[in-house]
Amino acid sequence: MTEASPQFLTVGADERRIAVRVTEGVSTARKPGVIWCGGFLSDMRGTKAEALAEWGAKVGRRVVRFDYSGHGESAEGFEDGTISRWAEEAAAVFDAFTKGPQIVVGSSMGGWIALLLARSLAARRKSKRLAALVLIAPAPDFTEELMWKAMPDDIRNTILTEGVWMRPSEYGPAQPVTRGLIEDGRTNLVLGAPFAIGCPVRILQGVADPDVPWQHAVRLSSCLAEDDVVLTLIKDGDHRLSRPEDLERIIAAVEEVGGH
């Protein structure tokens, strides 16, 4: 999809430049806008985000995408990144680029960011701005539950003493996992007790996901006991959920909670 250059938003005391792309369209109470929260070392030009923007352009729905600091077109400072910083950036983009109710679509780490965004909106008495969450292979608390607890002692010691460990990745270059990321993650954990979002939540999870076990999505669902939650398990689905049939499921979930 051909697009103009991204817009940039300055966030935080250190003035991080966050790249934002907007697919113009209508956002109303009946047909809310959509904001995309990507995954760890993912970006807004990925398959799922592009498909969502193309859908928005086709049906006239406003779709906002952005890259966290150190990701994609917000390229600088990945190793300074933490969950708190990336959640702050998501809230800033939400405030600056959206109006009216929004569906937050969060992929992998973006699922955690989406939950923290919902918490931020509630704290600021803006929960009515949240129409729904659509979470794709959501990875809340992944720094602790899926990284730290699974790491052998030698890797933990490397992180504690050297401040960073380069994690091999099948999706590209090795991923830096920093001590700051792990320690900050512990201040943002959400799965310790039940909590309410106050809007519909749709979760799509691959059973064949090697990075986020399907049981993690079940645990999240159980924490959202007060909300309207539908968990869809895709038997042959991997972590990316980027096949044509997966993209159709994502769009269908957005349409179901936000009107056609």
Image (cartoon, rainbow, N blue to C red):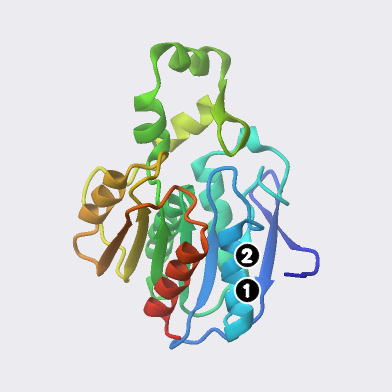
| Residue 93 higher or lower than 251, as above or below | above
| Numbered label attached to residue 54 | 1
| Numbered label attached to residue 103 | none
Task: Identify the amino acid type marked 2.
Answer: Glu
Q: x, y percentage for residue 56?
A: 59, 78
Judging depth in this view, the residue of 254 and 91 nearest the camera is: 254
- Judge left or right: residue 6 versus residue 115: right
Which quadrant holds the C terminus? bottom left
Q: Which residue is mark 2?
A: 50
Q: CA distance from mark 1 to mark 2?
A: 6 Å
- Judge left or right: residue 154 versus residue 85: left
Circles 1 and 2, Cβ within 8 Å, touching? The answer is yes
| Residue 138 higher or lower than 96, as above or below | above
Q: Is residue 54 visible?
A: yes
The structure residue drawn at horizontal position 73% and vertical position 41%, both measured from the top left corner, is: 76
The structure residue drawn at horizontal position 20% and vertical position 53%, both measured from the top left corner, is: 222
Q: x, y percentage for residue 43?
A: 63, 52
Q: Check disc 2: other Cα within 10 Å, few if <14, some if 14-19, many if 20+.
A: some
Q: x, y percentage for residue 25?
A: 62, 83
Image quarter for residue 96? bottom right
